Image: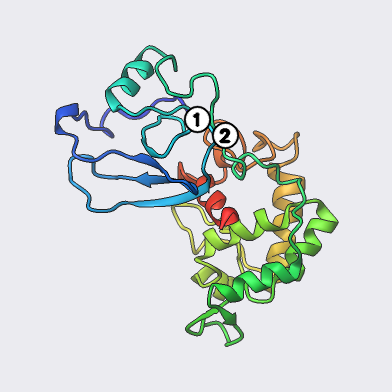
Amino acid sequence: NFTGWILDTTYEIVPLTWVKSSSSYTVTNENIKHNYVNKIQEYYSGSRGSIIGPKPEMLAVGTYYSFDGHYFYTDIKTLIKDYKNNTYNNSINKNNPYYNYYMYLSNHSKTTYSSVNIDEYTKALGYSMNVYGNKAKSGSSRLYGMGTFFYNTQQKYGVNAVLSYSLSRNETGNGTSNLAVNKNNGFGLNAVDSNPYGSASQYVTYAHSILGYASDWITYGYAHPRDWRYFGPQFGDKWIGMNVKYASDTYWSEKMASHYYA
């Protein structure tokens, strides 16, 4: 959902007749999944993807294509035609665009889930306490027992506890990454693409990371209207919200939505 410029040497034009697989959305009676495809000239028996929310009311069960995640097509040629003409006239939901609830939920909302609920969910994922020097034990996670801190930062800084928890899950591989274990960094803070580990911030405890994220990075950062990175208080996409500046991954926000929905 962003229009911009790319270098002339960084893309490849592929005739549509050569395309074997395309990114798509699968809608079932229960939910909607975004299927990612990287090499469109190859057949895929399966694909990576994220179940991002419950079944949208405006979409019937089936497979769809979309160039922005809001308007959907059953035929990729029709999608391309509309895209070229800068219109959505031939999309099946042209009068009712889809906006994923979790992607566009404000970070300054409040979840009704408790700290106990968050900890119970971490246990349900199969993780236990991680207290073993600077190394992660098998089956352990820095997220274990952190529900109280996620909830307390929501009460103190007004930052949705489960949105924060979902982001931490995504950025740390459920609390097991090197940054989480060795630097107590639960959100990939300052882990720039060119030097993700070396440049990443280090915290005394994982709880300090949760506090710093809510305070410095959300309330007085990405969700503050006078901050240079402010494009709205939601995770959003490459047009609005945190996803514009927080991560280079186009589908970063969808992955958080997937965690929250789960």
Q: Are marks 2 and 1 in contact (CB under 8 Å)?
A: yes
Residue 99 image label: 2
Residue 142 visible in image: no
Report crowding for label 2: few under 14, some 14 to 19, many 20 or more residues within 10 A (C-alpha): few
**Relative to 258, residue 62 above or below:** above
Farthest residue to the left: give it: 18
Marks 2/1: CA distance?
A: 6 Å
Quarter placement of the C terminus? bottom right
Farthest residue toward the top? 85
Q: Which amino acid type is shown beneath numbered disc 2?
A: Tyr
Q: Position of residue 101 (x, y in %)?
A: 62, 41
Residue reaching furthest to the bottom: 132
Residue appearing at x 44%, y 25% in the figure = 4
Residue 51 point in image, percent of width and height: 47, 51
Q: Measuring from the top left, give residue 40's x and y in whole percent.
A: 23, 40
Q: Image check: 165 left or right of 214?
A: left
**12 vs 255: above or below:** above
Rendered position, 260 above or below 238: below
> Quick one: label 2 or label 1, which is nearer the N terminus?
1
For residue 128, above or below residue 111 = below
Number of the label disc, if any, that sits on residue 50: none
In the displayed structure, does residue 10 sit left or right of residue 172?
Answer: left
Across and down, in percent, residue 246 comes to 57, 45
Residue 52 seen by the camera: yes
Callout 1: 10 Å neighbours few (<14), some, many (20+)? some
Q: Secondary structure at mark 1?
A: loop
> In this rendering, would 124 be left or right of 214?
left
Residue shown at the point (52%, 82%) measured from the top left: 135
Which residue in the protein does label 1 denote?
70
Q: Residue at x 42, y 21 (%)?
A: 91
**Amino acid beneath label 1:** His
